[in-house]
Amino acid sequence: MNRFDRRRILARRRFLDNCSGGLGAAALAHLLGTEGRTAAVARDANPLAVKQPHFAPRARNAILIYQSGAPSQLDMFDPKPALAKWSGQSLPESLTKDLKLAFIKPNAKIMPSARTFRHYGRSGMEFSDWVPHLGGCADDICMIRTMHTEAFNHDPGALLLSTGVTQFGRPSFGSWVAYGLGSESRDLPGFVVLGSGKGPNAGSNIWSNGFLPSVYQGTRFRSVGDPILYVSNPGGINDELQRARLDTIRDLNEHRFQKTGDMEIAARIASYELAFRMQIAVPRLLDFSKEPRHVLDSYGIGEEPAHAYASNCLLARRMVEQGVRFVMLTNGDWDDHKELDKGHTKNCQIVDKPTAALVQDLKQRGLLDSTLVIWASEFGRTPMAQMDRQDEAPGRDHHPDCFSMWLAGGGIAGGRVVGRTDEIGLKPVEDKVHVHDLQATLLHCLGFDHEKLTYRHQGRDFRLTDVGGQVAEKLLA
Amino acid sequence: MQGLRLDRGMEALKGSYAGPVIVPGDSAGSKLIQMVAGALDGKVMPPTGQALTPDEIGLLRTWIDHGAEWPSSDGGAEGSDAPQPSHWAFRPVAISSAPAVRDSAWPSNPIDRFVLARLEREGVGPSPEASRPTLIRRLSLDLTGLPPTAREVEAFVEDSRPNAYQDLVDRLLESPHYAEKWARFWLDLARYADSDGFRGDNFRPHAWRYRHWVIQAFDRDMPFDQFTIEQIAGDILPNRTADQHVATGFHRNTPTNTEGGSDPEEWRFEQVVNRTNTVGTVWLALTVGCAQCHDHKYDSLTQAEYYRLFAFFNNLEEVDIDAPLPGERGPYLAALPAYQRQRRELLEEHEVFERKPPWEEKVLWAAAHPGESAEWDVTFDELRTYVNLGERIIRTPPERRSVRHEKALTDFFVREYGRVLSKGEYDRLGYSELSKSLAELDRSLPRFGEAQAVHPEERPRQTHVYLGGSYKAPGIPVDPGLPAWLPAASRSNGLTRIDLANWLVSPENPLTPRVAANRVWQELFGRGLVPSSENFGSQGDKPSHPELLDWLASQFVRQGWSWKRLIKTVVMSSTYRQSSHIRADLETRDPDNALLARQARLRLPAELIRDSSLAVSGLIDTRIGGRSVRPPQPEGARRMGSSDDGGWKVSEGPERYRRGMYIQYQRMAPYPLLSTFDMPDTYEPACRRGRSNTPLQALNLLNDPVFLEAAQALAARAVTEFEGDLGRRLRQLFRLCLARDPESSEMDSLQTSWESQRAILERHPDAVEQLFAVEIPGVDRLDGATWVTLGSAILNLDEFLTRE
């Protein structure tokens, strides 16, 4: 132990001694964080301390996979052989009068899917030949074919899905969960965002804390440069110097804390120490060298075009293991108004294997029971073709009235298909599930009554499900 | 059936927001009968309780068929909207004199008597005055947003004249930086941003002109009534100036969705909602937006009243106006003829004049025949989405279009023509190159300032109550008007935005001055006398010191709505000058400091954290106003959203070190420092900023090269400007950053830190090389590097980030 270390420990002890009564007790607890001795007091001071939900939860963690841009459910999850029968025809007006369409007109022509579908697993759930690996998870998946939403543009749709309203400014799903449950990780944020492909629709607003305190904001792990913004030391500062800087900062902050008695200083000391632990933890998290080869291969690490997305899937599992409460994966873009065949072929090559590997890996490790996995998008795509130019291959337009999402793990019924859609996938026929219903159900799995997880802002209690939402019992195990 | 009341004659006959339910003389055509008979949407009214018997329904029918006469004695007259004077915020501002207090020595002005009277009632004494260094740092940050220089601190500490404090206040209020600091206060409310938001998030090249206008207004201490009127209705003031028109840029700060395929009317509607709610929040602190979909649950605002307010803003057209800055007109006009000639030649060469008219005809045809041709449908949709007023322009005959509009349409034509031509022909015409040449030609033209503004629509549209808040469900028509329960709101017809603005600042309206005074208090104490500064309605907080709030509000109006005088009054008080140290005796009794028995320690806002680092290191560029700047960002930070930020071409030279308030604000991908330190998201007015405390902030300040660069500049100052032995130099560093001398225990920490950091650096010459790369004669580079690391630690101290 060098002179400096001794000096630092003395300073810390002196600081803590001075804090041992009255005003300082909470600060002490805060500094000690989850080290345990005074956890009850620490809870008052630390906004990310672990909190109990309304009732016993089925899931303790969630991985929300946001496939940005709207994948085509008709070519992946919801087979509609009847489309072939109507191919090239317009829908009768009686069916189209209420349709909200972004680009095409109601008289656009029906386009059958070029995919072939197969039954998988004991449940016999159907998946197309674009997503055979997902088919391998059929008995863990609950497929909802009758999702519907209010927005038919990307940003409003992405906002409704992640914040419950089509406008900006509300807290995101992950922020609500971090607010409600706190974080179990000592050295990682409670709500993490991983992205691949083009930036997601509605940008950082889909992991925004809105009007909740900003500690509940999603922390974006980036694929370019530092994984977390500024997590690396700047040029010239090595780890030893970084620690030395932090010691100076802590020492002087402690002096000021004693002088002013302001708890914010104690909280700032804790923030700096957590930042330093993150600097150590993050590179370890990203270091896959200790993962066995077969695990890496199952995800498709190192295989293009899947590598970036596959890495995020593996990271998501590693984060859940480390106690990160909520992981949001964003990937895209699926918005194939034209050349859908080409675009979706590539996107499915990216997502099929890694997503399936994530579900299976969680299961093998016994984590799937307590982890909700959600495959989501802002809406689906139309049974009609979009063809803006005669010399381009067709695509499909936005379809908010009827589309598919799936869930797995944490209290969800595997091997079940919920909802029936009409012959051509235009409208739900049975068991409609609104985005708010989905949100209510997911919060239910995490132990919350969605009507009671509220925050008062501008004189009103706000919640994720805005003014709607009913738990969809059929999704639950 | 929203808005329907059957217990009052007038209202029963008016009907619901969807229209009348009783048609006198025609029971078969009366919805009321269908409702009670269950013949409307299969629902039987009333929804609870017993349904009406056939006999009762028969009676109703007969009554309607006989003319539906309501007995005149009962509620038939106008005036059924009961005013609501009982709520404190709507009562007139009470002019009371400051109360008597026992300790007559403490108060410096009436504010203190209001505060002290309460403290004496509670048996609590005020805190002692803060130290002189704390006072000058507090005042400098509060009034100008910049820390004091070492020399300013020294001068003030040594100035023992009784007027020293007041002189300092006056000097800071006259500083040009006062306007920057308080403009930023207003820009939060005005939801200022440099981009559209949403999927395109297009950069708004002219947005800064509004910011510039706000800075100038604060610089001239423009009275708040005038400031209000110009922003709300500057475009329609008689004999308006160009500047007054620029002020209406306030209404242009709404987010805009230009996503392909969106319905322009939907987003126009959303913008009107945003504007209505903004005025409600900013001037009245009322959550009027609650009544967009239904009658307000807690306050008296009905949905119909909401849409009467909405109607004031429902006929605004967005327009970019010529607003040349001094010196721009001459060079522009000189270059214009050559520019026009070249543009004409380019267009001629590429057959634009022949090909555009038939193209226009086809677009208009597609507008009239949707669904018949996908290519032309898309062209028309894109025109509506991407060209401001695109649809209106193409529907105007060419000879009646303005030069600006014709140009916008032509540029769009060149870009879009490929959609309806074969690739071969489009390539042969060379339109992609033409598009580039035209853009290049535009860039060669000398700058001619423009500004975002609004003006009234040519053909005003009728406003309705929109059922359930949906633009697709118009109910009964309504005209512009003010809620009747607001004090002295005029009920006359034909009201304009000028009338609205005049009413906002009229002597009869107690809300505007109360709300404004409360915001100033919040800015200077971290918490308003009404903590819910965004909500003065019945669900908001009650004022902690109602008489003081009214006294401030009446002072504000009496002193000619002068922000500066109001601010001066507050900062001259003893209440403001108290120490901000936490008091153990009040820790549990008054944790929020509602009694004001001390000042508050407040973490600085994002921009001021940057400004402080740049200021103490000497890097700061203190020029006032002007365009937005783009400091360097880490690679990939911008890609978090799909944001068109104009390529984020990093500003060069001193521009890189301009104050934080000038950093280009992209709604979809804000500059990281800004969002990490709680800059509001600018979608709606922000009345209170968060002051969070997170590890990401620590990483930002520790590791962002911008802050290390500031530490390097600070080190350069240390080795060239500081004098004396190490102890004296450490003292100077501390004083430069924190405006005070270190205490002896802090001196020990500084000394130890210096030694240990220097010892580490001694073992790492490569680090020294990187941290202190300059050769200065007579300066040991190891020392230089130590100043960098130690200086950077000081720039991270809680105290440095906090206004005490």
Image (spheres, coloured by chain):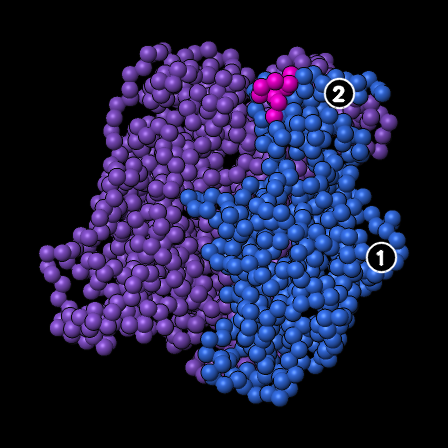
Cβ atoms under marks 2 and 1 closer than 8 Å: no
Image height of B367 relative to A358, above or below: below
Q: Within the image, what quadrant is residue A297 found in?
A: bottom right
Question: Which residue is rendered at x = 59% and y = 45% of the image?
Answer: A53
Q: Residues within 10 Å of mark 1 (few under 14, many from 20)?
A: some
Q: Where residue A166 sits: x, y (%)?
A: 51, 59
Bounds of the magenta segment:
A18-26
Image colour assigned to chain B: purple
Q: From the top left corner, tell me how far across and down residue B686 is, in percent.
A: 46, 44
Q: Name which of mark 2 and mark 1 comes first in the sequence.
A: 2
Q: Which residue is mark 1?
A: A296
Shade of chain A as shown in the rendered figure: blue
Q: Chain of mark 2?
A: A
Q: Is residue B54 visible?
A: yes
Q: Which residue is mark 2?
A: A8
Vertical relation: A114 (above or below) B1: below
